[in-house]
Amino acid sequence: MAYVCEKSLGPDKSCDFRSGRIILQRPIEREQMQKLLATGRTDLLHRFISKKGRPFSAFLVRGADGKAGFEFAPRAAKPGKAAAEPVEAKSSAIKPRTKAPTKIAKPVAKTAAKKGVKTATNKAAKKAKPRKRASG
């Protein structure tokens, strides 16, 4: 079943809107679909299910191409986090680094050898013949 614009039927087709009655596992009420066609936007609808299986809320909006899309409500600020304030212009002088880096990078060849990854240095080491020790 689907919702179809009344003006899309008959000889005088002035509307080509068509939408399913169920969108992302949520049934859309007739009143909301009428509101979408009349104003271009529904009320905030809850219980849509995303592709990952998570529920979300959104407005259905009619796009310029005539298709229905989503518009999300602005998120409320999380408690405990400060709101983003505009950054003031600071001088362009470069400040010296006061803290030494905490992690030192390991040589690529040693890390790759442990993981079994072939690199140019590993291949060369494997191709080289082992040296004989001079006994004496």
Image: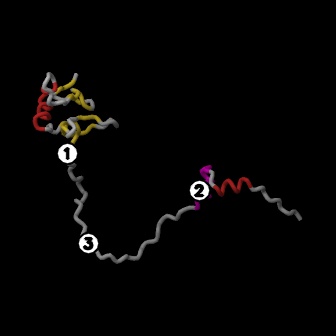
Magenta stretch: includes residue 111? yes
The quadrant of the rendering that contains the N terminus is top left
Decide if residue 63 is on the left or right side of residue 112: left
Rendered image quadrant of residue 85: bottom left
Q: Nearer the viewer, mark 2 or mark 1?
A: 1
Q: How is the image coloured?
A: secondary structure
Q: Residues within 10 Å of mark 2 (few under 14, many from 20)?
A: few
Q: In the rendered image, which residue does mark 1 sit on? A: 73
Q: In the rendered image, which residue does mark 2 sit on? A: 111
Picture coordinates of residue 48, whole percent (x, y): 25, 35
The quadrant of the rendering that contains the C terminus is bottom right
Give the residue at x 49% y 64%.
103
Q: Which residues are magenta?
A: 107-117
Picture coordinates of residue 97, whole percent (x, y): 42, 74
The answer to which of 15 and 54 lies nearer the viewer is 15
- Kindly report the distance in space between the C-alpha atoms of the residues bearing marks 3 and 2: 43 Å
Give the residue at x 47% y 66%.
102
Amino acid, disc 3: Ala
Amino acid, disc 2: Thr
Decide if residue 96 is on the left or right side of residue 63: right
* Vertical relation: 49 (above or below) 132: above
Picture coordinates of residue 72, whole percent (x, y): 22, 44
Label 3 SS: loop
Please name the predominant secondary structure of the magenta segment in the image.
Answer: helix
Give the residue at x 40% y 76%.
96
Magenta stretch: includes residue 62? no
Q: Which numbered dot is residue 89?
A: 3
Amino acid, disc 1: Ala
First in sequence: mark 3 vs mark 2:
3
